[in-house]
Image (cartoon, grey):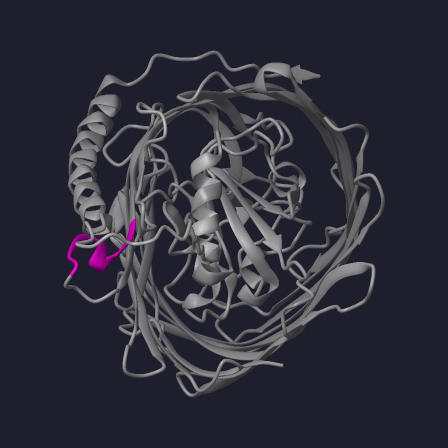
Amino acid sequence: MRRFLMTPKSTNPFSLTFCAQACAGALGLFGGIGAFAQAANTPASPSTPVQDMGQIEIKSNRDNDTAVRRESTASKIVIGREEIEKQGDASLGEVLKRLPGVTIQGAPGRGGAIRMRGLGSGYTQILLDGQRVPPGFSVDSLTPEQVEKIEILRAPTAETGARAIAGTINIVLREGQKANPDDFKVGTSFEHGQVSEQVNWVHNLQTEGMNGTLTLSGFDSKRPDDVSTHTVSEVQANPAAKTDRTSDTVSVGRRQGVHANARLQWRGEQGTSLVLMPFLVYSDYTNQGRTDLRQTDAAHSVTTDSANLATQSRYVMTRLNGQFNRRLSADDLMEVKFGLGRSTYKYQFDQTGGMTGLLPTLSQRQDFTDLSNNLSGKLTQVLPNGHQLVSGLELEGVNRNEAGTTSVTDESGDLKASTQRWAIYTQDEWKFNSQWSAHAGLRYENILTSGTSSDGTRRNTSSVLSPLLHALWKPVPGSRDQIRMSLTRSYKTPTLYNLVALPSLSRETNSPTRTDRVGNPDLRPELATGIDLAAERYFEGGGLVSANLFHRNITDLIRYTITQVSNPSWAPGQTRWVSSPHNVGDAVTQGIELEAKFRLNQLWPEALPVDIRSNMSFFRSRVKDVPGPNNRLDQQPDMTANLGADYRVRSLPVTLGGNINYNPDYSTRQSDAQWAYQGAKKVVDVYGLWRYSAATALRLTVSNLTPSDYITGSTYVGNGVSETARTTTRNWQNVTLRLELKI
């Protein structure tokens, strides 16, 4: 067994200076906004006495979400139904991209992996109803209609888990409201000549003795793809031996599927309740396309090739989550959560190549079945002197059976793998006085991963102890200004794919930018010591401004590196370029996240009541064992920004709004020999909502209003060769027309 305990390292003085200066400037601006807002919300003195009718307070869901954020000791952002459904997004990823510090990987408007603070895969913990998402499931596939609220925790807690170096996103599925009518939405979207349909139905159960909701989403989406890659290869000892290669791939993909989930709740006596949450996902995908390849050598001799491409995949997940609560006494509550799930994935790729061999004929198949289970218990105790003690135990297991074949090698692709995890934690939240409250916790987690394939059995065991401390300070009791502080230890574990993945062969001629991929069973988890500091001001009439600083020292950073391997087991007698994950050393990252939400007439009483929502984040990082410049962490831009506005026209039942999302381009030096490039992304979304009646509305949404090509690249210089690949991905406007009914 390996035990990995991180010891704090010295803090980078430049990073703290940068963050402090940026925060000071932001708070100065926020102070001015706050003064304007308070002045705008101060009522004028009446000229004649009026009768006091008592206090009448009306709050929207957004106000309640802000109140939860304000009172939480640990830093938490809550996004409720009002914000989720405002823009009329087709997927949850489109909602998440507008949240502070959140980025979405991939081409604009295409969706992709969800990141916080610009950090790469595995740094952000994704939870579904407080539990880790099932294997193979992407939360980007959820529709906004399935979600009740989104919680963002910038620093980990013992209860939610410490596998969250960047933070945690908890997605809470819809909750039933007996008094609410059903929601029914049907829409059609158009993108570059392709038509897609989507229907959503949310049914609130009216059964006596049971509270619940049923959500059903069906979709039939078609999406065009147009990708071009230009590759230049040279032999360093002979610069004249230069190869120029251009690959153009055009295809159309079609995805059909259905999502169904429910939340069923029974309440008994003495604080007893049972919640069952069944979940079904079915998705069928087909893609037909063609690749044309043109290669020019140093003698200007041109070789061409073409290949027809066909992809089919099917993903099915069934899962049942449950939660049982029982109040043991007036101050003690017991909570038990459980989950059982099964997911299957079938994938088939066929490439029918031409005569020259540049695009070989090959066939790849991958089938896997995941069985997952989890069980956890938690005891909450309210103690004297304002303490609330929470202690818990968690058990989780995942078993994978995978079968795969490829025509490139005779190796069998069979794999059996499993992950077993257990954790124990305790945390205490208490209030010292009207100015100070604190949240302290300790979590221990142990993970065992093993896999058996034709190469034998591989095992990896790791354990991590995570102390966590949060504090909330209100300089003036009862004021709307407050300071948050956190000191935490968090970590990132290698995934099952990182550890025991079977070899994945390149579909074109193997090279430094078209590598095979394979796992590494000797990986250690990344560990991070983190500091968070935030200043917040909440306006009396709603809205807020905040500035959040963060700093993370990371050890045992995991990164994919490229090497040449002679006579590998999957390609006997050959020398292959192979990309595999390794622990490459230490890194540091820091940044500042700024956010402002308010109505325009809070600043200027004569202005229209336009809702403004904006955020801007700046990031810096450095991998210490990689020479600079641009030795940043993978996939972390220098900054990300959002600016959105919504306005309800006074004279018409019309609401107009939009949002601009921007990420600049950046380069990353990944090792002595590797570089990567990510192009700039600017996504403009606009919408209009015409409400015919309280029960009927028509929505027009234009996503990616100003499309531009998305460019990525990679460079390798080493082992006597130099190769640079540049990929251009086209994207287009997406226009959606949707009818929204309450029935």
Q: Position of residue 438 (x, y in %)?
A: 49, 20
Left or right, 2 with respect to 228, comes to right
Q: Is residue 392 magenta?
A: no
The residue located at (17%, 59%) in the rendering is 605
Residue 649 in the image: above or below residue 6: below
Magenta range: 597-605
Residue 404, visible in the rendered structure: yes
> To which quarter of the image does residue 642 belong?
bottom left
The residue located at (34%, 53%) in the rendering is 51
Quadrant of the frame with the C terminus: bottom right
Q: Position of residue 690 (x, y in %)?
A: 39, 83
Residue 537 in the image: above or below residue 299: above
Q: Nearer the viewer, residue 572 or 19?
A: 19
Number of numbered discs present?
0
Q: Nearer the viewer, residue 452 or 300?
A: 452
Q: Is residue 603 magenta?
A: yes
Left or right, 215 with respect to 510, comes to right
Residue 550, visible in the rendered structure: no
Q: Quick one: which residue is furthest to the right in this view?
A: 269
Q: Nearer the viewer, residue 270 or 326?
A: 270
Q: Position of residue 551 (x, y in %)?
A: 35, 26
Q: Nearer the viewer, residue 249 or 719?
A: 249
Residue 452 in the image: above or below residue 352: above
Q: Position of residue 365 (x, y in %)?
A: 69, 63
Quadrant of the frame with the N terminus: top right
